[in-house]
Amino acid sequence: MEEYLLSFSIYDRIILCILASAFIVQMVYYLAIFIRISLYDPGKRKYKETKDPVSVVICARNEAENLTNHLPLILEQDYPNFEVVVVNDCSDDDSEHILEKFQEKYSHLRVTLIKHDEKFTHGKKLALTVGIKAATNEWLLLTDADCKPESDQWISTMQRSFTDTDNIVLGYGGYNNEKGFLNKLIRFDAFFIALQYFSFALIRVPYMGIGRNLAYRKSLFMKNKGFASHASIQSGDDDLFINEVAKGRQVRVEFSAQAHTRSIPKKKFKLWTMQKQRHFSTASRYKFGHKCLLGTELFSRFLFYASVLLLVINPNTWIIGLSAFLLRLIVQLSVFKGAMNKFNEKKIILLSGLFDIILPLISIFLYFVHASNSKHYRWK
C-alpha cells in the first residue's frame, strides 16, 4: 500500500485530497442532515386535539380550468371550521363565473376580486396580501390554484401541527406523476429542494417554504409588514418570507401523505426553466448562513464529481475514483429512498444519480442567463 501511494504524483495527491475533503463534506450532509427525514418518527410528536379555525388562501389569475378541477377538493375537506379565500386576480377567462357558481353551493367560500388596471401592474404578492387581509382566521393555509390536496384530510393533518408556540408549518408540495423524462426531472428537482429545506428545518435551521403547501399565522404576516422588505421582487412570497421570519423552535414540518399537495408540472423544458430562473432573484437574498449551508453542499458536490472524473481517467487512480463514486452513490440512494417514501415520490430513484449531476449544471446555466437578462418576470 505504501509503495502504491508513493507512486502517485503530486498532482494525483492533490486530486485525492480534494476528493477526500469533498467526500467527507457530502457524507456529513447525507448522514447527519438529509437522513433525518428517513429517520423521522411522527409517532413521537405531540399533536393538537382541538381544531383551530383555518383560512385557506388561494390566488388565481386565469385559472378557470384548475379552479373547476381542484377547488371542490379543497372546499370539501373533512374539517369542521374553515373558510376558503380565493383572490380572483385580474382574470379575463371564465374564473369569475365559475367562482360565483361555487359560492352558490359552498357558503364557506369567499371571493375577492382585483380588477385589471392598465396604469398599475402587480405580482402575486399583492394578490396574496389582499387574500390574507380578507381572511378572518389566525391560521392561514396557502396553496395555488393548480394544486390539489392528496386527501380530504389535508387541512386536518396540517392543522394538527399548529401549537401555541409555533408560527409556521411546512408541508410538502410535489408534482403529478406523468410520463416523460422532463416530468421525472421536475419531480426530482422538487423532491431534492424539499429534502434540503425539510432537513434543515429539522435541525432548527429553517430557511424556506413553498407556497403550494404552507401554513403560518396571520399575526406573523402582519407583524412582519407582509412582503414589504422584498416587495420589489416578483418572487419570494413563500421562500423569502419564510427565510426572513422563521425561527428554529417556531417551525414545524408535516410529512404525512395526507398533508401533501400535487401540482401540474410544466410540459415544456423552456417553461420549466423560466420558472427556475425566477428563483434566482430570491435565493441571492437569503440569510448569509443559509447561503453558506446550501452553497457548501453544492460546491462540495462539484468538487467531488470533478475529482472523481480526473481520477477515473487516470490509469493509476481509476479504482479509487470509482470506489468513492460508488460508495457515495450507495449512501445517497439509501437516503433518497427513505425520503422518497416519506414524500410518496415514485419512479424517480433510478434516475436520481443522473439528476444529481445534471441539475447543478442546468442551474449554473440558468443563473448566467438570469444574470444577463433584464426581463421582468411576471407570476402569470
Image (cartoon, rainbow, N blue to C red):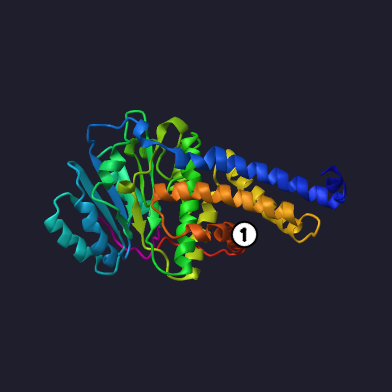
> In the visual, does 16 lie left or right of 139?
right
Residue labelled with disc 1: 364
Badge 1 element: helix
Image x and y of residue 366, in percent: 58, 62
Residue type at numbered disc 1: Ile
For residue 220, which quarter of the picture?
top left
Front in this rendered view, residue 188 or 312: 312
> In the visual, does 199 lie left or right of 344?
right
* Main secondary structure of the magenta stretch: loop
Residue appearing at x 21%, y 49% in the figure:
77
Residue appearing at x 53%, y 51% in the figure:
333
Image x and y of residue 161, in percent: 33, 36
Q: Is residue 250 visible?
A: yes
Question: Dot 1: few (<14), some (14–19), or many (≥20) neighbours within 10 Å?
Answer: few
Q: The N terminus lies in which quarter of the figure?
A: top right
Q: The C terminus lies in which quarter of the figure?
A: bottom left
Front in this rendered view, residue 88 or 362: 362
Image x and y of residue 224, in percent: 41, 38
Front in this rendered view, residue 351 or 360: 351
Q: Is residue 333 magenta?
A: no
Residue appearing at x 28%, y 69% in the figure:
93
Q: Is residue 307 visible?
A: no
Residue appearing at x 46%, y 46% in the figure:
338
Q: Is residue 118 magenta?
A: yes
Image x and y of residue 372, in percent: 62, 63
Tell me the magenta residue range. Answer: 110-122
